[in-house]
Amino acid sequence: MSSIKILLFAIPLILQGAIAGSPALDHSKRGVAKKDTRYIDDAIADCNRALERNPKDAKAYFIRGVAKQASRDIDGALADYNHALELNPKNAIAYYNRGIVKQASRDIDGALAELNPKYAAACFNRGVVKKDKGDLDGAMADFDHVLQLDSKDATAYINRGLTKQTKGDLDGAVADYNRALELNPKDAKAYYNRGLTKQTKDDCDGAIADYNRALEINPKNASAYNARGVIKEANGDHDGAIADYNRALEIDPEDAKAYNNRGYAKDAKGDSDGAIADYNRALELNPKDRTALQNRSVAKRAKGDIDGANADWNRDLQLNPSR
């Protein structure tokens, strides 16, 4: 749910003036223009030619790294940023982008070392990395700093809200989502996250309203359909819940939670066979889904399949021996 700010297509615009006038950089300069028009392969080829002419061309390594990063060649981008920084250790943006690449490759400590909190975007990404690592207080401090630098950064409010939500500060999270939506009233993620927080606070009507708005903006948010279905089910609207779970599964056919939730709604309607089929699928996707195991056990017992029910119950005990 966290967002990462990556300086990709903006970076070559910054560099165009810097690389002009260097005879060795004719190819890399043309590579920048091509990458701006998304001709990534051509941009990489131009940088390759520049490096054949001058193997110590730091800017060409850097630009090729940006192009590879844009094309999701994480290992290639990392290698090029390494070369660029060996040749020019003062390229702050290369450190920043290398940090993002390391984060993408799950080198969390390496990413943290690269992201300089002096820059708002770097500080933001450092906060995201810390949050993913479980350092919630550190993440909060970074998002606070970002908002001191730019009080209108809606994405920073959303991520600080997520951090507060994880820490259990639900009112603080809602306040941050409110501010994010004041800055960007069409941010579907902010509506969705605020809906989750309201749902946790038992403000189900408020949560439904936020999920509705999130789905108006982004009809392909499977998680919002799933979350809205949970509330409908809790309110006794089994058909409405099933409709939402159906939609979630159309968008993401491998959503184990949606299968489990749909199974529960079907079971509530008396469709034990349909429920068991959904629990089966949920467990195919996630064999350690204890909720699906427990629900399937109940459904099997209701059908008179005592052996099957006991088998599921014993499997659940194996997954949680301390129970």
Image (cartoon, grey):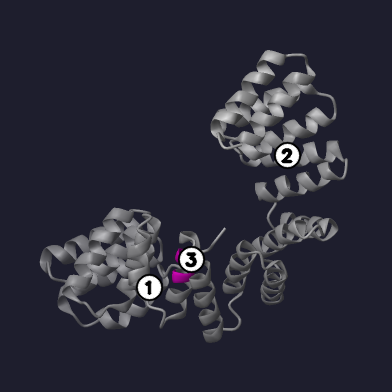
Q: Residue 284: give x, y in percent of width and height.
A: 56, 28
- Pointer 2 or 3: first along the chain: 3
Q: Residue 69: give x, y in percent of width and height.
A: 35, 60
Q: Answer with the quarter of the image where residue 264 lies.
A: top right
Disc 1 marks which amino acid? Leu
- Tell me the tag on residue 245: 2
Q: Is residue 181 left or right of residue 285?
A: right
- Tell me the tag on residue 115: 1
In the rendered image, the vertical position of residue 49 relative to residue 298, given as above or below: below
Q: Label 2 neighbourhood size at 10 Å, few (<14), some (14-19), many (20+)?
A: many
- Pointer 2 or 1: first along the chain: 1
Q: Is residue 121 left or right of residue 231?
A: left
Of labels 1 and 3, the one closer to you:
3
Span shown in magenta: 126-130
Q: Looking at the rendering, in which quadrant would you find the C terminus? A: top right
Q: How many marks?
A: 3
Judged from this view, the residue extending furthest toward the bottom is 148
Instruction: Check if residue 112 falls in the magenta segment.
Output: no
In the rendered image, the vertical position of residue 304 relative to residue 129, given as above or below: above
Of labels 2 and 1, the one closer to you:
1
Q: What residue sits 61% from the left and 40% below the top?
A: 252
Q: What residue sits 23% from the left and 73% below the top?
A: 59
Q: Answer with the quarter of the image where residue 158 lies.
A: bottom right
Disc 2 marks which amino acid? Tyr
Closer-to-camera residue (307/80):
307
Q: Label 3 neighbourhood size at 10 Å, few (<14), some (14-19), many (20+)?
A: some
Q: Is residue 268 left or right of residue 291?
A: right
- Tell me the tag on residue 135: 3
Q: Looking at the rendering, in which quadrant would you find the N terminus? A: bottom right
Disc 3 marks which amino acid? Asp
Of labels 2 and 3, the one closer to you:
3
Give the prevailing secondary structure in the magenta stretch: helix
